[in-house]
Each structure stands twice: as C-alpha cells, then as structure tokens.
Image (cartoon, helix red, strand yellow):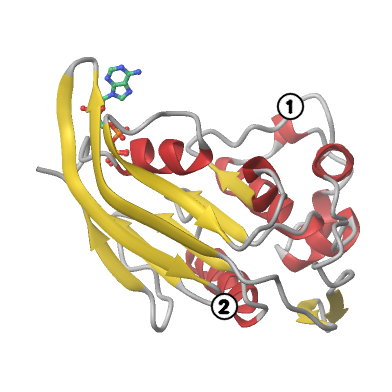
Amino acid sequence: MHESCAASLFGLRNNVLTLRHTSFPSLALTAETVTCRRGGRLVFEGLSFSLGNGEAIALTGRNGAGKSSLIAMICGRLLPAEGSLRIDGAGDVPLPELIHLVGHRDGLKTALSAGENLAFAQGLLGEAAASPEEALTAVGLAHVAALPVGYLSAGQRRRVALARLLVSRRPLWLLDEPASALDASAQQMLIGLMQAHLVQGGAIIAATHGPLGLDGARELRIGL
Ligand SMILES: Nc1ncnc2c1ncn2[C@@H]1O[C@H](COP(=O)(O)OP(=O)(O)OP(=O)(O)O)[C@@H](O)[C@H]1O
C-alpha cells in the first residue's frame, strides 16, 4: 500500500458493509477536447470534463456512442485521436494502480469458486481492503462462496465482479453498465457500495442506460 492511502477500511455490521476509516489521496481526472475514432470512424469529439474526489459521473449515450471507448481511454487501453486525458495528484502511482474496472465481461475464472476468484484478485491487485468473505457477504453471496463461478447465475456472477471492488482499494472506479443482470435488491446494494466509495473520497465513472440512482452524480452524455 502506498503511503498516502489509509489502511483497510471495511467492516461488516449486520451483513452491511461499513467504513472503518478512510480517505483517498487527492485525485483529479481531466479530459480536454477528446476525440475518439474507431476503425477510422469518428465516434465522438470535443469531449471535456473533470472529476475529483467524492464525485461521480453517469456516462450516457445511445448504443455505439463511445461510452466503453471512453472508459478504455481512461484506462490507457485506447489513445484519444485528439485531445488529452490526464490524472493529477496521484504522485508516482501508475495509472493501472488507481483504477478498478468492472467491464461488460465479468472477467471471472469459472472453474474457481467466488471466494477463490476474490482471493486471486486481491493477490493480483494488492492494496487489500475487505476480505473475500466480507466482500461476498456485502454483495449477498456468502451462501455460494464455495461454488465454482461457472455454476452461478448471470446476476450472481455480476455480484462477484462487483465484490472485486471491495477486496482491493483503488480510488477511481470505472464501471461499464454495472447494473446489468442485477435484480432490484442488488441494484440497491450497488448504489450503497458506490455511495460508500464516494464518502471515502473515491471517484466513479459509470456507463449506464438507466438511472444510476446516485445522488449528486453528474450526467455526461456522449456521442455525435
Ligand atoms: N475494436 C474496434 N474497432 C473498430 N471499431 C470499434 C472497435 N470497438 C468498438 N468500435 C466501434 O466504436 C463505436 C463505439 O463503441 P463503444 O463500445 O465504445 O460504444 P458504447 O457507447 O459503449 O455502446 P453500448 O451502449 O452498445 O455498450 C461503435 O461504433 C463500435 O462499433
């Protein structure tokens, strides 16, 4: 764990995730007149925004508007055709260590159990926060912790993917349609996790086709 991060922060009370203590270092993401082209085709242009600690953006736009592409740009997996994206305030912490990405694909190993997937993620990502057991309890999956993920339903797998946000501490959450396959109670759970992250001083960009349900989230609509 780098010095500016507080130590681990989660506890469970009545199976609800609670904060022990917190705070992320100051962080500012700035996009300036970003243009996205894919396969030679213009997807969006002139996009500017900023995001700081405790802030959330709901990224909206029609299918193909470029939401996932923007998330890939923030991750450094795709370069803007024009303009710039930068993160300030993170000192010498490399970009991948600032970001949690929950993409369209759950990225889980189907032969491993939910608990093993989370333990693997925690070992890989570092910055340990909640234990795999705590994280699975927080997303309502303690009862299937030992089952191979391949046996879980789509919504349960999505919950495991979201539980990965809790086992390792990263200030910027990039969530691509995080509520897909979630039932109503899991959507409320997701809102609670996002709110807790913002209270800690984290930041969130979530691509969504529906309401994010987060008080204070700004909408950023992209596309041509
Ligand atoms: N590897 C690629 N090569 C060429 N074009 C691509 C590639 N990946 C995506 N695109 C195109 O880029 C555009 C933006 O795609 P993107 O997935 O970012 O949209 P989106 O807003 O996330 O869409 P959705 O709401 O359907 O998830 C689409 O027209 C898509 O076909």
Q: Disc 2 on helix, strand or loop?
A: helix
Pointer 1: residues within 10 angstroms few (<14), some, or many (20+)? Answer: some
Q: Which numbered tag is attached to residue 110?
A: 1
* Residue 141 location, quadrant: bottom right
Residue that mark 2 sits on: 195
Residue 115 vertical placement versus 132 (above, below):
above
Mark 1 belongs to which amino acid? Thr
* Direction left: furthest residue: 224
Q: CA distance from mark 2 to mark 1?
A: 29 Å
Q: Earlier in the sequence, mark 2 or mark 1?
A: 1
In screen coordinates, is 58 left or right of 77?
Answer: left
The amino acid pointed to by label 2 is Gln
Depth check: give the residue in front, 62 or 92: 92
Q: From where the camera sits, is residue 145 visible?
A: yes
92 w.r.t. 133: above or below: above
Tell me where residue 65 appears, x and y as whole percent: 20, 40
Q: Residue at the front extreme?
A: 91
Which corner quadrant holds the C terminus? Answer: top left
Q: Residue at x 62, y 44 (%)?
A: 95
Quadrant (top left/top right/bottom left/bottom right) for the N terminus: bottom right
Residue 61 in view (yes/no) = no
Q: Quadrant of ligand 1?
A: top left
